[in-house]
Amino acid sequence: MLITVISLLIGVLSSFIASCISLWIGVHYERIRQRKKYSGLEGKYSSFRFSDSDGRQLESAQAGTAVISYLRDNLLSIELTHDHRTWFGTILMEAGNAGTIVWRYIDLPENQREFGLKRCIAEKDEVYLIGDQIHGYGKEVLRRIRE
């Protein structure tokens, strides 16, 4: 009887340890996979807006610059400067190459706030930003600056 109880306890304990190791390996593998996938977006970018007359045509003049940094897992940060203004955001990559940006301007006086959400689509050397057009934030393209 005592041997059966000890065998049962050893079996439960070894199953628990094996489950914990398996879970740790799975989580670690997923983090490595996400780091490999999203850390490639890190870098400096030039910002280009779309033409007001043709919403599919990019303007030739650079509108600003951006820096994207990898934080962890599927989180990145972005700082974009254009028109002498700077906003900072956190990018949550949700599915494949699509994500959401929570952003706010960081150059406003202490008693003012300007913030919102943007959608983004990340490609190899370009990131497409889709803003809230109701408030005047349209689409723009970030192109990687090769150094």
Image: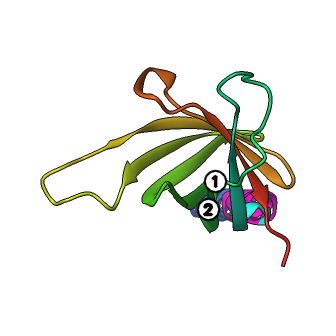
Above or below, 91 against 22 in this view is above
Query: Residue visible at 52% across and 44% down?
Result: 101
Relative placement, left or right, of 145 versus 27 is: right
Relative placement, left or right, of 141 versus 137 is: right
Query: Residue visible at 37% across and 53% down?
Result: 105
Foreground of the two, 49 or 93: 49
Is residue 12 among what the camera can see? Answer: yes
Query: Residue visible at 47% across and 54% down?
Result: 89
Amino acid tagged 2: Ala
Return the residue found at the far bottom: 147
Report x, y in % for residue 52. 65, 26
Foreground of the two, 53 or 122: 53
Residue at the spot of label 2: 66
Closer mark to the observer between disc 1 and disc 2: 2
Amino acid tagged 1: Asn
Asked if the magenta segment contains residue 34, the reply would be yes
In the rendered view, how is the structure colored? rainbow
Toward which corner of the image does residue 25 lie, by quadrant?
A: bottom right
Residue at the spot of label 1: 74
